[in-house]
Image: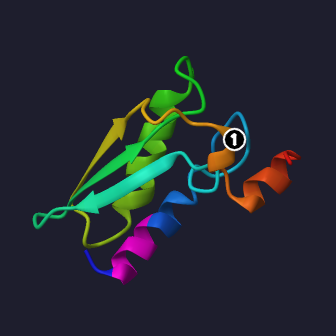
Amino acid sequence: MNEELKENIMGALELVVDPELGVDIVNLGLVYNAEMDDDGKVDVTMTLTSMGCPLAGTIVDQVKRALADIPEIKDVEVHIVWNPPWNKEMMSRYAKIALGIR
């Protein structure tokens, strides 16, 4: 996958906002990786802020919808992982400022 497509994917994922925190999943540091195979299938590896997140299904659906608008992408698979565990240090400076975290 070329750099422009990778940027488009990450830009689309920035439109997916964690409904509980009000900040997008990229700036929260929830997206660990996004890879596309030769058939146009994108595998997104991500985590959630907590294992018991009641909105996991909603976030996964939003990820799939956000990437559906990119013409090169034919299919999306979202893999929720718990290792490495998410922590606030994974957030961007923007997310920390938005949430009032130092």
Q: Relative to the observer, which residue lies in front, 51 or 83? A: 83
In the rendering, at what x and y percent does residue 48 appear?
Answer: 53, 34
In the rendering, at what x and y percent does residue 42 appear?
Answer: 26, 56
Please identify the quarter of the rendering in which residue 75 is found.
bottom left
Q: Residue at x 38, y 54 (%)?
A: 33
Apparent side of residue 65 relative to residue 97 in the rendered image (left or right)? left
Q: Relative to the observer, which residue lies in front, 40 or 27? A: 27
- The answer to whether residue 7 is magenta is yes
Magenta-drawn stretch, dominant element (helix, strand or loop): helix
In the rendering, at what x and y percent does residue 73 appear?
Answer: 26, 65
Apparent side of residue 39 relative to residue 3 in the rendered image (left or right)? left
* Residue stretch in magenta: 3-9
In the rendering, at what x and y percent does residue 19 appear?
Answer: 66, 38
Q: Residue furthest top?
A: 52
Q: Residue at x 50, y 58 (%)?
A: 13
**Residue 41, relative to residue 18: is it above or below?**
below
- The answer to whether residue 50 is magenta is no
**Residue 58, relative to residue 29: is it above or below?**
above
Apparent side of residue 89 relative to residue 76 in the rendered image (left or right)? right
Q: Relative to the observer, which residue lies in front, 101 or 69? A: 101
Please identify the quarter of the rendering in which residue 1 is found.
bottom left
Apparent side of residue 52 relative to residue 46 in the rendered image (left or right)? right
Q: Residue at x 83, y 46 (%)?
A: 99
Label 1 belongs to which residue? 88
Q: Residue at x 38, y 82 (%)?
A: 4
**Residue 60, relative to residue 42: is it above or below?**
above
User: Label 1 sits on what residue type?
Assistant: Lys
